[in-house]
Image (cartoon, rainbow, N blue to C red):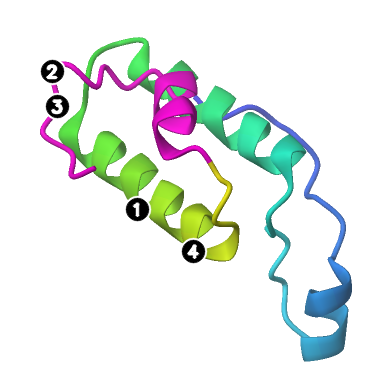
Amino acid sequence: MLSKHPSPPLTPRAKKEGTRMAIEANPSYHIAIAKEFAEVLKEGNCPEVVRLADRLACIFKQDNPAFDRDRFLQACGVDLTLTKIRT
């Protein structure tokens, strides 16, 4: 079940581009997203959810080269020793 967090405010980039893009390289968003994944993965390591978390980690890494992919996935509740996610 997803938490009922309010939508994040529009970023300056989103306002300029006229989109609803609200996620940029912002650690508070990464933490909130990881918490949601962890909540879903408490019931088991669902491959589709793990794959989505991995794809988001790749997007975050492209946006911010200092982003720590493995740390994010661990915060999401992904057991990196049991998965075959590319590094």
Tell me, yes or no, whether the highlighted magenta stretch contains residue 85. Answer: yes
47 to 57, vertically: above or below: above
How many angstroms separate mark 3 from mark 4 (CA)?
A: 22 Å
The residue at the point 69 percent across, 59 percent down is 24
Residues marked 4 and 1 touching at CB (< 8 Å): no
Q: Which residue is mark 2?
A: 82
Query: Which amino acid type is shown beneath numbered disc 4?
Result: Gln
Residue 39 pos. (x, y %) = 48, 18
The residue at the point 69 percent across, 70 percent down is 21
Q: Which residue is mark 3?
A: 83
Q: Is residue 27 left or right of residue 6?
A: left
Q: Which residue is mark 1?
A: 55
Q: Point out the tag, 2 or 4, that comes first from the N-terminus.
A: 4
Q: Point out the tag, 3 or 1, that comes first from the N-terminus.
A: 1
Residue 50 pos. (x, y %) = 27, 35
**Image quadrant where residue 36 sits:** top right
Residues marked 2 and 4 touching at CB (< 8 Å): no
Please name which of the two marks, 3 or 4, marks the residue nearer to the observer. Answer: 4
Q: Point out the tag, 3 or 4, that comes first from the N-terminus.
A: 4
Q: Residue 62 got which mark? A: 4
The residue at the point 75 percent across, 36 percent down is 28
Tell me, yes or no, whether the highlighted magenta stretch contains residue 83. Answer: yes
| Residue neighbourhood size for the residue with mark 4, other residues' Cα within 10 Å, grouped as few (<14), some (14–19), many (≥20) | few
How many angstroms separate mark 1 from mark 2 (CA)?
A: 17 Å
How many angstroms separate mark 4 from mark 1 (CA)?
A: 11 Å
Query: Which amino acid type is shown beneath numbered disc 3?
Result: Thr
Residue 2 pos. (x, y %) = 55, 30
Query: Which amino acid type is shown beneath numbered disc 2?
Result: Leu
Instruction: Write the start and end of the magenta stretch as one range.
Output: 68-87
Residue at the bottom extreme, as displayed: 17
Label 4: which secondary element: helix
